[in-house]
Amino acid sequence: LTTVKSIYRNTAAYANKEVTLGGWIRTMRVSKNFGFIELNDGSFFKNIQIVFEAEKLANYEEISKQNVGAALIIKGLLVETPEAKQPFEVKATQIDVEGTSTPDYPLQKKRHSVEFLREIAYLRPRTNLFSATFRVRSLIAMAIHEFFQGKGFVYAHTPIITGSDCEGAGEMFRVTTLDLENLPRTADGKVDYSKDFFGKETNLTVSGQLSAETFAMAFRNIYTFGPTFRAENSNTTRHAAEFWMIEPEMAFADLNDNMEIAEEMLKYIIQYVLDNAPEEMEFFNSFVDKGLLDRLHNILDNEFGRVTYTEAVELLKKSGHTFEYPVEWGIDLQTEHERYLTEQIYKKPVFVTDYPVEIKAFYMRLNDDKKTVAAMDLLVPGVGEIIGGSQREERLDVLENRMNELGLKKEDYWWYLDLRKYGGTRHAGFGLGFERAVMYLTGVGNIRDVLPYPRTVNNAEF
Ligand code: 4AD
Ligand code: MG
């Protein structure tokens, strides 16, 4: 089969030649003697127009009766049509029906709301919006691999089922084979997980970081790219229970190196998508988020902002803006604060660093002031936090102190602590929320619309 993408990219090579296409009817208009089909062949965001005539097709009747959504194989002549909206069309010489559709096909030629399309998530990749979104999602994944592989980072696959809680937030999905109706219990009445499949309590990973650190201590520069799971009971446009994360981890690196690589990575992805999906990006710019392309170009041309948490709190207080949640040193920045910082004050992506130790995870490196840690969050306009990372605590005694303060059991992390004993070096890393990156690059405002099959509270359909 010829792909529509190659016809668009190299029309001259196909002009006045026979092509064979396989695709689905997006729209169809028929009259007594001829008809038009807008066909999408899946290879490209754009459709191709097929013209068919009663005189040339023995099965003209059959084709005229096809419904939107039907799958066809079409042979025909590619002719250039310079005056028309589409610069070429196919004059069919043969059309075979591979799969019929029905009149109640849910995707008719009209604009459907994203809410409606979520209810038919198994069909929505056939719409322009989702065709563009999932194609760009795929390209961003490619860009990320290219970026890190190009720098010699090793791709590490960290486990999905784990026995630890990396973020210490307790927002984990339990993994168990125990009979819930009849749980085995220890003498003191607690659930006896030694009887469970793994002989201990396990859960779906919230982050691959701890295992990533072990690989960084062997390969120096590594990255993970995999699914992560959080049982956060927050029904927002930016949280999903199952999402993908990219977590680079670098030995002999500090917080500055971390920010540099994060900025370079994001710019690389943006450039890659602009280069490889110009039609899709035009579409987002016209129909989803006017100003998207200007914004992305602007990001490529400017350095990201950098501000410490302490300075950021001062800036927010001085702004005179009334926040729903009042700003005080020590609070965890809320979405409204993050967005105000990046959208109103900086008007570009900004790294916020050195957060209070109390509001960050146990593994972050304690600063000399003993009040803050070497953390960094990257905030971007339109989305808010897209990256969270830090320099890690490599000093065994300081790390153990912190774990004691938080009541973390050393037995659960013995191997992680050992890393600090056996050639533990300065190291740093971060996690990029993949869906948030897709939202940022497309302007799509809801995480449910950048995930093929979103898992959120009360939703695991499909
Ligand atoms: O800030 P987070 O929690 O950081 C970590 O998990 C670190 N262990 C990463 C590291 O240093 N290796 O999560 C990282 C990013 C967030 O900035 C956000 O973009 C995304 O993951 N994220 C979510 N995305 C969608 N739905 C959720 N529920 C998310 N929770 C975090
Ligand atoms: Mg975070």
Image: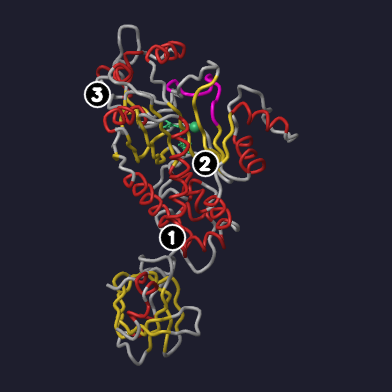
Q: Residue at x 46, y 11 (%)?
A: 405
- The residue wearing badge 1 is 275
Q: Position of residue 312 (x, y in %)?
A: 63, 31
User: Disc 2 and disc 3: Cα gap in Å?
Assistant: 33 Å
Q: Is residue 161 left or right of residue 64?
A: left
Q: Marks 2 and 1: in contact by CB < 8 Å?
A: no
> Is residue 35 in sight in this rendering?
yes
Question: Pointer 2: residues within 10 angstroms few (<14), some, or many (20+)?
Answer: some
User: Disc 1 and disc 3: Cα gap in Å?
Assistant: 47 Å
- The amino acid at mark 2 is Arg
Q: Quadrant where the N terminus lies?
A: bottom left
- The residue wearing badge 2 is 238
- Total marks shown come to 3
Mark 1 vs 3, N-terminal side:
3
User: What mark, if any, has residue 352 been given in the picture?
Assistant: none
- The amino acid at mark 3 is Phe
Residues rendered magenta in the picture: 353-363
Q: Position of residue 143 (x, y in %)?
A: 38, 51
Q: Is residue 145 above or below residue 30?
A: above
Mark 1 vs 2, N-terminal side:
2
Nearest to the observer: residue 151 or residue 358: 151
Mark 2 vs 3, N-terminal side:
3
- The residue wearing badge 3 is 198
